[in-house]
Amino acid sequence: MSFIKKFIEQETISRRNFLLASAYGVGGVAASSMLGGVARAAISDPTVAWSYRNRTNPYWNEIVSGGEAFIESLGKPKEFLTHLINEGSSEKSLSDVKALLSKTNGELALAIDTNDAPNARPIVEAVAQAGGYVSTIWNKTDDLHPWDFGDNYVSHMTWSDEGPAEQTARILLDAMGGKGGVVHLGGIASNNPAIERLQGLKNALKDYPDVELLAAEPADWDTQKANQVMSAFLTRYGDEIKGVHCANDTIAYGVLEALRAEGIEDMPIVSYDGNPQAVQLVAEKKILATVFTNPHWGGGITAALAYHAAIGTFKPSEEPNAHREFYGPAVFVTPEDAAAFKANYIDSVPNYDWKDFWGPTNGQIAYK
Amino acid sequence: MGSVLTRNVLIKWAPLIVLIVLVLFFAAMEPRFFSLRNFARIGISSAPALMVAIGVTFIIIMGSIDLSMEGTVSVCAVVFAFAFIAMGGTLASFAWLALPLALLVGAVVGLVNGMVHVWLKIPSFMASLAMGFVGTGFALLLTGGDRVRVQDELFRSLLTERWFGFPIMCYVALLFLLIGWFIQTRTTLGRNFYAVGGGEELAHASGLNVNRVRILGFMLAGVFYAVGALLAVGRIGIAETATGSNFMFVSITSVVVGGTALWGGIGGVWNTLIGVLIVNVINNGMVVIGLPGYVQDGVLGLLVILAVVLSTDRKSVTFVK
Amino acid sequence: MYELQKVDKIFPGVHALKAVDFKIGRGEIVGLVGENGAGKSTLMKVIYGAYQPDGGDITIDGTKVRFQNPRQAMDHGIGMVFQEQSLITNLTVMENIYLGFEQQFVSFGVINWKAMAAAARQQLEKVKLDIDPATITSELSFAQRQLVELAKVLTLEERIDGDLVILLDEPTSVLAKEEVELLFSLVRELTKRASFIFVSHRMDEVLDLSDRIYVMKDGEVVDVVTHDEADVDAIQHKMVGRDVDKEYYREQKQKPYKADAQPLVSFKNVSLERKYSDISFDLHPGEVLCLVGTEGSGREAILRTIFGLETPTEGQVALKGSEITSFTAKSGVVNGVGYIPRERKIEGIVAGMNVYENMTLSQMGNYSKSGVLSIGEEKALARKWIERLAIKTPDVYKDCGGLSGGNQQKVVLAKWRSAGSDIILLDHPTRGLDIGAKEDVYDMVREMSDDGVGIVLVADTLEEAIGLSHTIIVLKDGEAQKRFECSPGDKPSLYDLVHHMI
Amino acid sequence: MTSKTMTAVNFARIKPHLPWITLLALVLIVGIADTNFLRPVNLVSMAADIVPLFIMALGMTFAIYIGGIDLSAQSIANMTTVIATLALPSYGIGAALICILAGLAMGAVSGYVTTKLLVPSFISTLAVGGVAFSAAQYMSGQRALFMDATMRDSTFGWMTGVTAGIPHEIFIGGALVLGTWFLQSRTTFGRALKAVGAGEPAAVASGLNVTRIKIMAFALSAGLAAIAGLLFSVKLSGGSPTLANGFLLPAIVAVLVGGTPLTGGVGGVINTLIGTLIVAVIRSSMLYFEVDATKQQMVFGLILIAAIALTIDRTKLRVVK
């Protein structure tokens, strides 16, 4: 019967809001106030939500696990975290956020990857207007900044992939002996990380005049597509291929299997993301290096920033810009340190201090 | 009479001719395309797609359509992987039971799909589209988004072991192609698909239990999707919710390119084989000749239109929707 | 042997069968006649199990039976040969014959094609058809297909121990005369093994073949006559409830056409590859020109050429004196050609659209301003023509798919006449219509002639062709054989025509 | 008349109203669970957010209304987000015109391939969509592009503004639904579409230029998809070849749930309006009922089956394929 009780309680509260809203509507009070724009100092018990692409990708699973770990650190069950899954659709991403803002009357602490950079602005605007708090990761346009929204746009974290990708590329090119052909399998071509990771490889190639970039094809972050593209590369370039640069771990799996089908076991490969499976492969020396971006911590801290800003633990507008826009951590995983890394980060997930917002970060975001 | 005969013969062999022309074209552009090892690569990428396409071929022959394959493939792959690992994780143990289990799961999903379509009288396009969501959703529920690795060397010999240059999975696909051919030509059910596609009301009036044929058709398709799922897992060693992604449009395109008409009654599994090969040759060939990634979707589209125009007997219809 | 007692069938709003008594003895051929909507097809569906009666009993040899579906009726020896071509054309002949009953040739899940072929050959022998059972059905002629359908029903003979009842629904509609005779001799021969229920609009055939004739009107059996007592006029009187005019084809209303006026349609040595060749004729205002020939003789292709659906490969076609260069249906319509197709439900009306939408479909330009429809005017037009042609419809909003065949035909006719078409192409305009509706059509043909409309007709029967036309062109294999002038009182005989057709 | 036939007649009377009854029922169910949902602010904002999807579904309605399908819609919307962003600096408001023209042209190509080359629309639109996607990738240089905020606001600000508490998207959607409704029910083109959908042979035999009508229907579909892309691009202030991803299936689902079945000639733009709102409500209901993340897709599929089973008017379907 408890759900009935819960319903009645909810009913009483929301009826008040409902009447209030109707009164605004009937009275024709200024439109902006009707649509939100609620100013409030702090929210005592905000809904905490994570909005992300999908659950079929290990990367996002790690993000979610971090979000849940943060929730549990608050002494709440992990079901308390609301999940908004956009399935790769910016349209659904935006609609879901707005629906949730309505449902919670703006009492929301939102962590989000907006799926496509242009989608960030409408989302941030909607959250700010409703009086909620939002922290974003990865996708945002360069002209959108947290400090332009007072407290409501808490922070943006991204990872500068160009540098780390360049470093893994160097590991790869060295393993190739500094000569021969290399192929790159990228993410969805227009995604920012995909562009940066390819750029990292190109930067490294400048120092290796004897290495030729044979081809760079998008594999859409997809294992099966990567598998097929690699097969075709083998036909086109055959033995010319001396190394493979993958934009992420899921692509690397497909590449490994395509090579395995041909009986090629010793091809130098580097990837990105540092998923547990990839770390295992690094330990086995099937992959030479990957870059761990600590999505578990990223997922937790992004939710924590939004939450603590919402309950008033800190006031974002009083923080320096470097605390509003910053780079996330990047840890190299190579065969030498893979075992230690695995023990520290994967076999036992570290207990992070979710109030140490900026400890592991990598400095303020710089725009080109 | 002579001219009619040659036209019929031409129509019958047109898809194969298109395939051969494509192979020769890509071989001319890049001689390395024309090698046994590359054909094996095309075979590997074709094998799972062929299974899925054969499944949907039966449905299309009935004049219906099935869009549930992505969900069904994912569910079968995930259930297989879980069962396989739970029962020992190698084919040498009782874990081989996971193989028939996967086929059974495919049949059950197909059965439900068919029942929703037939009993609730929902057109197959809508019923199967919705069932596809349910399937993918169910696979997600099972995995919670995780990937399940299947590393058993024996099972992976589908990919790694080769006979005459082709991995075992190609022979498995061939075996099921023959089974599909057998069902199509030598069983009542197979022939009844053509009857339903040729004239559903007439078939019903002849005493044929059309609803039963339809439901069985969706069930059979489910079994073939399951085989496709097994080969897809065999190919990359991972079962996940995304295992079924991208199968829908590719398989239906392949079926149509092979000369099976979307309005039912015409075509068969050999057409589908040719169709799948055409699509995979194009996909492989475009990368092999070094076409930039961003034009590949467009070129594939144009070539598919060209292939359908050349390989379908469209004179038999007055209009197309 | 097989008997219906006080059978009722009710549909929402329609009492389709009212306490019908019907029986058929062993080896008997029973005719069933009635106007469209009299309840014939409902009765047949009850007999072969497609409908379940709402009242009354069905008995076989005194035992009560109830069929849930056609399959159960078949299991009791009742089979149906359908009016529409009911073979599935992409299957082989033997597959069609054994469709739904393949199990007898299956062992271990495998079909034994040889056994099925042998069995099918045996069935085909019963109907004296010598073709390979593995032939794809679409390659057969219509007559052959009709015989295959009969052979299919006759498989009941082997399957059922008891007596057979076979329903023949309009089996002769696509057959030529001599094919009809072949069918009849077969049926008579088969009475040794089966009883037949024969349904046809061709009264002469029913009289010829049947031992007894049931006459239906408004869902009731109004008369049962024996072969010897049967009289066409009496039966038609019972069916229609009024006297049928002796001057059935309105010959007395036939007036000479304006032979000196400019021809509406002019064909000069026109050919269409593989359809017809070297056809020439002129169609004048007020003339009814009939094209006579067997199925595939090129009649329909000529109609379709006039309308613009086919582009001739040679020769000149002129409409109202101006030569046609681009053959599209649009240009046909603009030149005042109206096409009343044989497949009324497919090409004539759009089921799912209402009466006024159908009527203005070919002339929306007249009822719209810059693309915007004036629906009020459309409705007014529809009301006018509903009255003028006595179309039976509750209102202008009625879905044409729900109208009876005769009324659908009237809607199609109204579509063209209201648009002012003065070249009307009639393709089997009376096919499947009952006598009353046929007479309405004949009246309309005469009225149109009087108004100076030129009509090209492909008639349902030769009698109709002779009765209605001013001019007859006999076609065979796409070539014109003979031209007849048919002024009233001086018309060619059936024999004259048939002589040139075959 | 018996009581049984009476209920049958009554049900037949209710049938055409089932789509909006379903919508109302869904709104009430969610509203009872959480009255927040029923606040006008929320309902208005939900409606405004669904507008781009609705516009695409509106276009899709025309393709489905004539018995076809348009699988190119999403790619065309993707393409127009790129075109709009690229063209805004040099052409201003003219960018909108370029987008719409590009959409119409692509749709006309689909229509041409379908009607003249007799390639089923399932394949032809998929292929043209591939071309549009390639074009989008090429033009964007495979990057996400951003509109200058001031330029966007001065040129297209009217699209995303708010008047009297109503977001302008709703006015745009409303204007388009009125326009297309007028087109569908009051113009010769709409009537011709209905004839083509319900009985193509009869439309031909009435002298209608069926080919042209179909090409126009596909052009209209793609044109509206382009408007959807344009509006979305303005709303998000940028463009990318993947920005409109995830539109296609919901748009098809919206049309089908509204009660425009794939058999053609039945339903229409008003149905699509209701169908889109049903999709929007189902989507929000996931949040309001706090459906677990891993279960959402499966639940969506199940509700979809129920909604379609309720809303389609089977009396208008001759054969359920």
Image (cartoon, coloured by chain):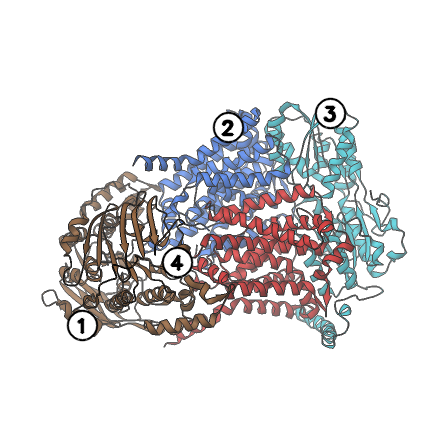
Chain colours: A cyan, B blue, C brown, D red
Answer yes or no: is residue A115 visible. no
Q: Of the residues tagged 4 and 2, which is closer to the observer? A: 4
Q: Of the residues tagged 1 and 4, which is closer to the observer? A: 4
CA separation, marks 1 and 3? 100 Å
Q: Name the residue rendered at 25%, 40% in the picture.
A: C132
Question: Which circle marks residue C333 in the picture?
Answer: 4
Q: What is the crowding at mark 1: few (fewer than 14 residues within 10 Å), some, or many (at least 20)? A: few
**Same subunit: marks 1 and 3:** no
Query: Is residue A114 or residue D195 the one in the foreground?
Result: D195
* Label 3 sits on residue: A211
**Same subunit: marks 4 and 2:** no
Amino acid carrying label 1: it is His
Amino acid carrying label 4: it is Val
x, y percentage for residue B87?
57, 41
CA separation, marks 1 and 4? 40 Å
Q: Of the residues tagged 4 and 3, which is closer to the observer? A: 4
Element carrying mark 1: helix
Residue B204 vs A344, above or below: the answer is: below
Amino acid carrying label 3: it is Val
Q: Chain of mark 2?
A: B
Q: Confirm or deny contact between disc 4 and disc 3 (CB under 8 A).
A: no
Q: Image check: B242 left or right of B183?
A: right
x, y percentage for residue C199?
22, 61
